Image (spheres, rainbow, N blue to C red):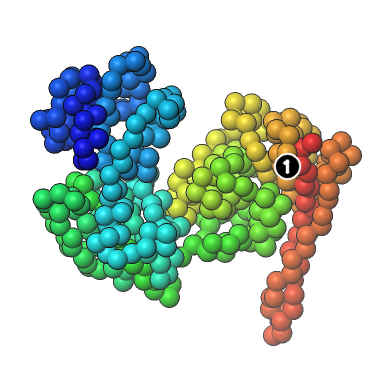
Amino acid sequence: MGAAARQAVSAAEVVYGGKRHLRLVGSLIRGRAAPWPSPIRSAIPEIEALRGTAVAVLASGDPFHYGIGSVLAETVAAEEMAVFPAPSSLALAAGRLGWAVQDVQIVSLCGPPPETLLPGLQPGRRVLVLSADETTPQAVAALLAEHGFGASSMTVLEALGGPDERIRQGRADRFALADIARLNLIAITVEAALDARAIPVAAGLADRLFESDGTMTKREIRAVTLSSLAPRAGELLWDVGAGSGSVAIEWLLAHPANRAVGVERREVRASAANRNAAALGVPHLEIFVGEAPGALEDLPAPDAVFVGGGIANEGVLKAAWRALPPGGRLVANSVTLEGDLALGAFVQETGGTLSRLSVERLDRIGGLHGFRPAMTVTQFRAAKP
């Protein structure tokens, strides 16, 4: 801690922090030491109530990089704070490894499950993983080995910047490090086997990556559908008639800040969609079992809606359209005459557009080969004025 930070702690009437932090700066504290409650957010009203009093909040490294700073900033204005950042664990790790931070994928597993790491496992890339605790490195090693990245190099960096700092390295599928410190992060140099489940960064994932009973938006149509939905960072999608969850999953993969909820009337399909989301690195997909339009009533307001089922029910399209804000997008796919008729009528109401999407795939015809057409898809697309 620099001189200004030390002075701020000594001058504070109340000092908030983890027990470890409070113990480390104990000689500087002149006021009341307040250990964080669980959950930490429950202390925010108390801190707000102390407005006008000198309050210090302790954090490791940079409090605005995966730290408490952003939580405080939700209710405390920036001009009310004096921030004294120190080098973050990520900066320390990059310095020890000689890695350029701007070229590294950063993933936090402090809360999210290990599967969150999967989209970042791109062959030849480098990843820094913020660990939840001492068990995270073993869980990450198992995940890498399971998905075909067992040859990846894992470096576990423990207690960086302190007297007990330790850096150890091993291969993921031979991971045997023991006695790992609770405070650690993991550096991964990704090596992929030929059959590794690397998740492509473009829309249109292979159908085989999804568990499905056959009711799903197929790869080529899904790629066009994602293009029509036009995801933007931080937006929320409703996937109505989610099936295998493939459209919502690819929406979430488009940007880490994106959110999605799915509505599926069959519980077995909803369960499969949840498993698909976890297997493809977006376990935060929310699937609700219910039937539209009734099941849409209590959902958070969407930025875009995809309707892949129930189109013949006129109320589904109308409920989705009502829920959208100005500029929100609605995309609906139909493969039935009844669905086409519903979309045709809805075009007249909304001023949207209709497209016909056809795909033919090579197949065997006796001892020869030919192209066999899949069902033609009618796609409705509109942006709400």
Query: Can the viewer see residue 311?
Result: no
For the point 10% across and 30% down, the residue is: 27
Q: Tell me if 101 is positioned left or right of 184 in this view.
A: right
Image location of residue 219, percent across then percent down: 63, 61
Asked whether 366 or 357 is in front, the reply is 357
Residue 206 x, y percent position in the rendering? 57, 64
Q: Residue at 74% across / 75% down in the picture?
A: 371
Residue 87, placed above or below residue 157? above
Closer to us: 357 or 290: 357
Q: Is residue 73 above or below residue 32?
A: below
Provide the residue designation for mark 1.
330
Q: Is residue 92 left or right of residue 105?
A: left
Q: Quadrant of the N terminus?
A: top left
**Residue type at the position of mark 1:** Leu
Where 23 sits versus 87, above or below? Answer: above
Please give the name of the residue rendered at 28% of the width and 44% of the height, measured from the top-left corner.
86
39 or 83: nearer the viewer: 83
Q: Is residue 370 left or right of residue 37?
A: right
Q: Position of residue 54 (x, y in %)?
A: 28, 20
Q: Quadrant of residue 341?
A: top right
